[in-house]
Amino acid sequence: MLRIVLFLVLIALAAAGAAWVADQPGDLVLTAGGFRASTTLPRFVFLLGIFAAAVVLVWSIVTMIWRAPGRLRRRRHEKRHARGRHAITHGLLAIGHGDTALARRHADTARRLAANDPLALLLHAQSAQLEGNRDEAQRVFRVMAEREDTRLLGLRGLFIEAQRADDAVGAVMIAEEAIKLSPSSTWASHAVLGFRCARGDWSGALAILDSNLSAGLIDKAAYRRQRGVLLTARALELETMDRDVARESVMEAIKLAPTLVPAAVLAARFESEAHQVRRSMKLVEAAWLANPHPDLADAYAHVKLGDSARQRLQRVETLAAKTPADKAGHVEGQLAIARAAIDASEFARARAVLAPYVNDPTQRVALLMAELERTEHGDGGRARAWTLRAVRARHDPAWTADGYVSDRWRPVSPVTGRLDAFQWQTPVASLPSDKGATIESSAFEEAMLAAPPPKRVTAAPSEAPVEPPAAAPDPLPAAQDNSPPEAKETTGEAAKEEPAVTPAAEPVNPAPETAESSPEAATPVFRTRADLGKPAPAPIQAVIPIVRAPDDPGIDDEGPSDEFAEQIGTPRTHAKAQAGGWRGFWSRWGA
């Protein structure tokens, strides 16, 4: 509406001006030398307007002709840039769905049409990585690292290539340079923190953690927990070298992370040595309520030096009673009581505690039962049967991080380098072994566990003297316990000597039948009645199938399929090239 009013006002003013000019009397005379021209004022104004319009038209034509080459160049450049952006877009899409040839073709087009575009350099580098051309990828990333706008991205690419090449020193240097350029770079701080932890540079790791807090990468709660983890790791390392620094570190750590199990155990140990029994017990109890752990129970039992085994049992029972029965940690408390009861020779108490778990035992339950049988009755056969049962029993909780199971707590995951990654939890159960071997082994174990304790027998007068059975030895590895048992005739009760148990899928047969041995004596003691009329099978070599949990990053049966697979357990004389990734760096630094 305002525009319309303004337009009408302008028209009115123009009309008023034209009327005023038309009403002016007289003529306008122009004299120049001998030239004289005379005209009226309206005619002069009209001619002046035509002249101005002609001048503007001529100026526009001249300007258009003058600027035509530049416009053509800009139009050609814009068209070329549009084609380059089109190639970059489709090249990145090709990399996304793994089309190597199409990605390379678009990368060449983008490099030809938009060589200075940062995305063209990125497309070129990623297409080279997709093809496996690492030299070309490193060259492009170096070019990107020299540019101001792509320096951080180039360093990131060089860091990844250094990881793949297992160049730990180069990767650390690149990550540290990236932190200098951008302290808020998450990947660089994460990498430097992991590498410093791998080298045991706890002071440097704490400095990086402080920098992360200042840059806003972590909140205050995470900072306190991670600082407690790093201080605990430093204290564990310095425990035998500098106990004063270790004590100072772990005391600060237990204030920052009171539920951290290794910090609580070490702090309780230092307090116990200083005769601060009450404070030591409080530290263990606080961590136990949050995360029941066998190390906490052991630390609580030995919190007062010089106590007897029965006193330690009473103390462990007190700790276990603090855990609610509906919690998962209730099992840890019962196992701790069983352990202390065996040490105190309270075998009935240990059996009563383990009774709810013997039908479906874990490995620790089976091993405790084996020790109980060996300690209470001296029954080596039943102890070896429980030990064999522990081989295929369910896993107990362990320190696990990113599928990696460790025998001890570590501050950083060796797989991803993540800080405070290890958790006390049950790993994925082992893969089942051969069905037939499992059934026969189960029958073997049940027969051993159900059999009465072996009886001492004497030989008949008409037979050769029989040596009395010796005390049952401790369970031996399969490679050292392959001798078959010898069946012997007995008088009075038809009892048989205790067989030598081997951790095999099937029981080993006794010696072949002779003139002095009856067919029943030559038959394996674990064969069923239906098998008595069948010939004895040939001896089978004792083999325990080794299985691995799905989350265990162990050795594949056919070896690693790429450069990132870790070579674990390979003899030094036959070791392959060290693996890439975090595990390679971790092993390189000697973790």
Image (tube, helix red, strand yellow):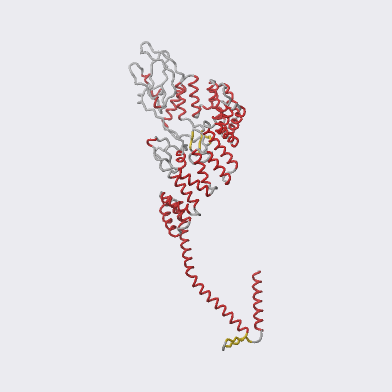
Residue 328 horizontal/vertical position (percent)? 56, 32
Extreme bottom residue here?
Answer: 34
Q: Can you say whether 81 is above or below 316 in the image?
A: below
In this orientation, which residue lies closer to the viewer: 512 or 562? Answer: 562
Asked where in the image residue 37 lies, by quadrant, the reply is: bottom right
Residue at image coords 52%, 30%: 240
Residue drawn at x 50%, y 72% is 64
Q: Is residue 182 above or below residue 271?
A: below
Which residue: 40% across, 53% down? 101
| Count of numbered circles on the image | 0
Q: Position of residue 440 (x, y in %)?
A: 42, 28
Task: Return the residue found at the far top.
Answer: 461
> Residue 391 vs residue 223: left or right?
left
In the rendered view, would you say 221 is above or below 343?
below
Residue 481, visible in the rendered structure = yes
Q: Nearer the viewer, residue 329 or 516?
A: 329
Does residue 324 appear anywhere in the picture? no
Horizontal placement of 222 versus 534: left or right?
A: right
Q: Which quadrant of the figure has residue 47?
A: bottom right
Quadrant of the image containing the N terminus:
bottom right
Residue 407 at what x, y percent from top left?
49, 33
In the picture provided, is 214 more to the left or to the right than 498?
Answer: right
Residue 541 sits above or below residue 28 on the image = above
Picture coordinates of residue 434, whole percent (x, y):
41, 32
